[in-house]
Image (cartoon, rainbow, N blue to C red):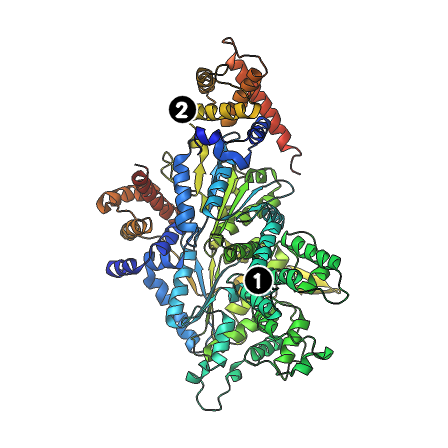
Amino acid sequence: MKTMEELGQLKPFQARSIIEELRKGSVPAQYVPFFTVGRDNWLTFIEDDLANYIAEGGAKVRFLSGDYGDGKTHFMSVIQHLALQEGFGVSFVILTRETPIHKFEAVYQAITQQLHGRFEGVGIRNLLRQWLYNLAEKAEKEAPSLEQMADLAETLRNLPGMNINFANGLTALAHNRFVPLEEGEEQEKRDAAQEIIFHWFEGGKVTKRELKPFGIFEVVNKSNSKQLLNSLNVFLRHCEHKGLILLLDELETVIAQPASMRNAAYENVRLLIDNSEHAEYFHIFFSIIPDVLLSEKGFKSYDALWSRVRSIGQKKKLNYRGVLIDLHRTPLTSKELIELGRCLRRIHEISYRWEAEDSVPDKLVEEVCTNQEKMGLLSEVRLFIKQLISILDMAEQGETPSEELDLEQHIVSSQQEMDQEKVEQLQPSWDQ
Amino acid sequence: MDMPDFFQLLEEANNFPLRRAVECLREGLFDPFGVSLLTARESQLNTVFDQGAQDVAKNKSTHLCVCGSYGQGKSHSLTYLRQRALQQGFAVSLINLDPREVPLHDFRQVYRALVSQISFPDSDDPLVKVWEQWTKGGYTKQLKGKKADPLSIIPDNMPHVFKAVLTALASENMQLSRRQKGLKKHAAFRPREFPWILSNALNGNAPPVVRIRQALKYREVSFYKEQSLVCKGWEPYFDLVRGLGLMFQQMGYKGWVLLFDEAEAIAQTRINVRRKSYAILQRFFCPEEPLHGLYPVFAFTDDFFATVKNEDYERVDTRAETEQPYFAENYAKAWRRLNIHDLHGLSAREWQTLAEKLIHVHGKAYDWQPEPKEVQKQLTATLKETGAQEARLKIKALVNQLDFVQQGVVLR
């Protein structure tokens, strides 16, 4: 996505944070455009969807399928960048034991905490602060009158699809910010009240009693969290965003759950798909491993969901508009991997302020790639990155990779390291 | 729909609704516009639905069950019926029953969903607005005479709180002087809040009773203190639905068509929940008193009736040392004569016509020019390949094939 020239503008600390993350096997989401290659066909159609369908009022759900190391998280981060560029609100949530899809209220909480958009910082709290700031700017020097506040409340309540609690919460925030302190009222009390409202918007635990003074009658729970999510989208549109893009990573954790939780999770996914009939300006991407589609505990075990996701016939062709974005079937080509290798080498150079081209020449990058291809592991982008960074690290520390470097052995050891990381990531295992 | 009508509708359509229709089909869903373009074999469905509509007009109770397996077109049929009912002058709500979020046994949630999805034939306004417009003069067409009282159509059997709320929605706020507004006893006089408190109450969102009471007081509803404003259990919400059906009829609509999709979800719940759901279904299917103005339509898979048939109707419930049947009735027996419309697959010719229509819809949705004859050949092959698969999957396969051809053009 970025040219070598643009890459050169990276600051050393930025470059270093990229390398550190990649070394750990994680994706430095903020910087993905600096080392993204390939996947053009998928991105062509996703861009078209965002600009010509979602931004026009459409809604859809897509599944991003790929094995460990195929680059699902990376790809989702690319989508995040695209969506932010297009002016959408975006939230990228990793589904975990603490944030399981069957408890949508927990997912809602994570969504609000990871919200990015046309505002400074991350999270709904910053969105709300920006909104208050904009209101203050509009009002310029004079605080809005009570009449204006009432108008604002009415406008918010009348936004189509807006939940009354969400609207009342916003109104209460505006009151809290703009209505002058009453006689004897302390600023500390105001701040505490503001904190309660923020906390409610974040899906945090607040009692009904605490919420009552603000006209908020419900705490966030499983039956209203989807409604509140829709209200968040309505509010984002009110704040001049084009809609909401949700990126929900690692849905595969569902497979290891007991049947009751799994079914509840699948039901939630099904509801989110069906919701796209009525929803507007809303796109959800779930990342999954192929097992979710193939295994008996996967989508197949839940008829209502499976009938929406499965397709029949034309197994050999890829539909770039389809419900499934199959990364496993569109691995990076050798040429693209080599291009990625060059990007990484440049980032490593900036990061550690050195010249890498002599000790890690293009030829060596090509050889790493050829060896990986020979061993049938070309599609494993994470493995390639792991190997290359380890070679660059060695070279930077003075151990110039000699021609005798056993690349096959190097692949094996890198893979072992990755397996170890995978095991660590999966701990603790789901309750059986 | 025949081809000339189809082309005319297509011609008039903008790009976005067409795209949404195709996007929905790709996910195995249906949107109303897609349904209006692509419905096949509608005459049988029309006949069976119209029969029920005639019963409603004669103030007879009626119902319809649309049955078919997964992917055979139940949702499509209900969406089609939604449009037909609107064309005939009914108010219509189409909802998906869901054991977690909209379970039939929790009829308050069902009512909320019904009201949130309600459509009227002559406007896109929500229920509250339609009611306000009616009371502010819309009634003159229906209720003749200078002294006609629009509130007279609120049925007596409607739960007290909703009668009060409907009355309040039609009333103006009490006038208070500036001095009175400053008094402590009028501290709750917040007139700007009253409309949304009342509308949320009518929509089943249950704002706190104290807030409803304040709104009723300042809207001068004379009778609101006569009974409790609290609704408990599912019966009041059922009575509310029943009352609204009658009320809509008196407002000049043909009645209220309630379309319940995925009703087979009832069979997936626990037995104690099922028996409650069956009791509610019984009120729809075999009501003791006629349900004036109501026309419930349920979509079931055959599994549902298998579950009903296999329930243990001999089972007893022991409470306070007395034994009672666990189920209030033997529903397998009671529901032997339901109005059931079974869905059947389309013929080869109907599939060909559908495929032809899809080519034109896809072309206009994504702004490209398919070569009709060539693409039709490919779709015929797809239809052959998908053989006896369910309709939903066959349509998905057709859309897939069209996507392949189009992506070849885009990526060229």
A284 sits left or right of A224 in the view: left
Q: Chain of mark 2?
A: A
Question: Foreground residue, A120 or B342?
Answer: A120
Tell me the quadrant of the picture where the C terminus of chain A can be found: top right
A298 sits left or right of A183 in the view: left
Which class describes the residues within 10 Å of circle 1: few (<14), some (14-19), or many (20+)? some
Looking at the rendering, which quadrant does residue B281 occupy? bottom right
> Picture coordinates of residue B385 (x, y %)?
32, 40
Q: Evaluate whether residue B310 shows in this view.
A: no
Q: Chain of mark 1?
A: A
Count all numbered tags in the image, as a single digit. 2
Which class describes the residues within 10 Å of circle 2: few (<14), some (14-19), or many (20+)? few
A47 sits left or right of A194 in the view: left
> Picture coordinates of residue A35 (x, y %)?
48, 30
At 38% from the left edge and 50% from the top edge, which residue is drawn? B391
Question: Foreground residue, A413 or B54?
Answer: A413
Q: Which residue is mark 1?
A: A139
Q: Secondary structure at mark 2?
A: helix
Residue type indicated by callout 2: Lys
> Which residue extends farthest top?
A404
At 59% from the left edge and 62% from the top edge, which residue is drawn? A167
Sequence-earlier tag: 1 or 2: 1
Q: Secondary structure at mark 1?
A: helix
Q: On screen, A386 above or below B163? A: above
Q: Which residue is mark 2?
A: A335
Residue type indicated by callout 1: Ala
> Picture coordinates of residue A95 (x, y %)?
59, 41
Looking at the rendering, which quadrant does residue A188 occupy? bottom right
Q: Evaluate whether residue B196 shows in this view.
A: yes
Question: Foreground residue, A238 or A167?
Answer: A238
> Picture coordinates of residue B42 (x, y %)?
33, 61
